[in-house]
Each structure stands twice: as C-alpha cells, then as structure tokens.
Amino acid sequence: MVFAHDTGLALQSAVWLANSAQDPDTLTSTEQLAAFFVDNGYTGRLVGDRAELEDVRALRPTLRELLTSSRDEAVEIVNRLLRDGHALPQLVRHGQTDWHLHATDDDEPLATRIAVETAMAMIDVVRADEMSRLDVCADEDCRGVVLDLSRNRSRRFCSTACGNRAAVAAYRARQA
Ligand SMILES: [Zn+2]
Ligand SMILES: [Zn+2]
C-alpha cells in the first residue's frame, strides 16, 4: 500500500462521503449513515439522529474541496480542520486493529471525527507529495473524486459504472 493502512482507509471513506453528494445523493438517511459507519470501521459514538446526519452531510463540500485541491490549498484546509477539531494525535490499538492514530475523543461529534481523521490522512498525502493520487473522474459528465492507491497509478474513474460507460463508448467509436 502507498500509505499506512489507516491513512488509506480514511482516504477511502472521505472519498466515499464526498462522492455520496453526487446526484443521486446516497447519504440521505440515518440508516445510510449507520451503514457508512460500519462499512468504514468507525468506532466510538454514533447518535443516529437527524442532526448528526445533517452535520456529516454539511461536511461533504469541505471534504471534496480538500480532496481535489492543490497541495498548498490542501495544507490550509488540513491545518484549519485540525485546529477546529482540537486534534491531539494518539496511537491506539483496539479490537482487531493494530496501532493506528486517533486524534479526537470517541465521544466527539461524528462530523468532527471524520473531519479530523481526513485531515490526519491528508497530512501523509501532502508530506509524501502524493496529491496526484487524488483526481476528478475521467468521465466528462462526472465530478466524482478518484482515489488511486494502485501501484501503477492506473485508476481514472470514480466507479466501475463510469469505467464501463467509457469502455462502451470507446468500443462504439471503434465500430463506427
Ligand atoms: Zn481506531
Ligand atoms: Zn465517475
């Protein structure tokens, strides 16, 4: 893996969140947020109410901005998110997960924890000068964020749906 395990996971979940705001929105219910929480291995407090959902939804434009910005712009956003979230990095080990970083308390609001966790992951991306691992989908009609953690940097589409659409279009172009 290009980055530490927890960095990769945090980036993946931030990309999922940013892309969930694309039409059709795939984060509109507390059930969807609970599924996101479980699927992405979050621990700590999940209130499960509408206010928590709205806070996470409201964070999505910031995540998108962070994930698609230039390196210098990313630094400003990272530092702001760390300051606002009162980040305090601590190595922790729990459940099946070996030593990794937490920088907020488990009972902080979920949106704060996501913001800080994404910022912590972006520290690695900025320091390794690997912003090129993040891009916008190669499909002209899609604004999805692409995270490419592959060794040969081959990923161009945000989803298999976008990749398949491009493959079909290329096939049709050859047939014409
Ligand atoms: Zn953890
Ligand atoms: Zn796409």
Image (tube, rainbow, N blue to C red):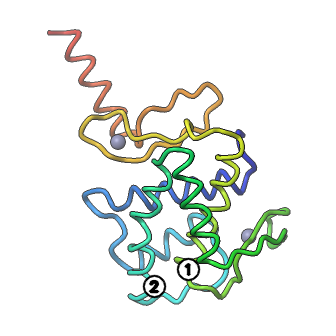
The circle on residue 118 is: none
In front here: 102 or 125? 125
View extreme (left): residue: 176
In the image, residue 125 above or below residue 50:
above
Are the residues at dot 1 and dot 2 in contact (C-beta closer than 8 Å)? yes
Residue 86: give x, y in percent of width and height: 67, 79
The image quadrant of residue 87 is: bottom right
The C terminus sits in image quarter? top left
Residue 91: give x, y in percent of width and height: 84, 68
The N terminus sits in image quarter? top right
Side of 64 where 108 appears, left or right? right
Side of 127 where 14 appears, left or right? left
Neighbor class of circle 1 (other Cα within 10 Å; few <14, some 14-19, many 20+) is many
Side of 153 where 165 appears, left or right? left
Label 1 amino acid?
Leu
Q: Residue at x 45, y 48 (%)?
A: 68
Q: Residue at x 55, y 72 (%)?
A: 37
Q: Secondary structure at mark 2?
A: helix
The image quadrant of residue 60 is: bottom left
Label 2 amino acid?
Glu
In the image, residue 73 above or below residue 1:
below
Neighbor class of circle 2 (other Cα within 10 Å; few <14, some 14-19, many 20+) is some
Nearest to N terminus: mark 1 or mark 2: 2
Q: Which residue is mark 2?
A: 52
Q: Residue at x 66, y 56 (%)?
A: 121
In front here: 87 or 160? 87
Residue 113: give x, y in percent of width and height: 61, 75
Q: Residue at x 70, y 50 (%)?
A: 124
Q: Which residue is mark 1?
A: 110
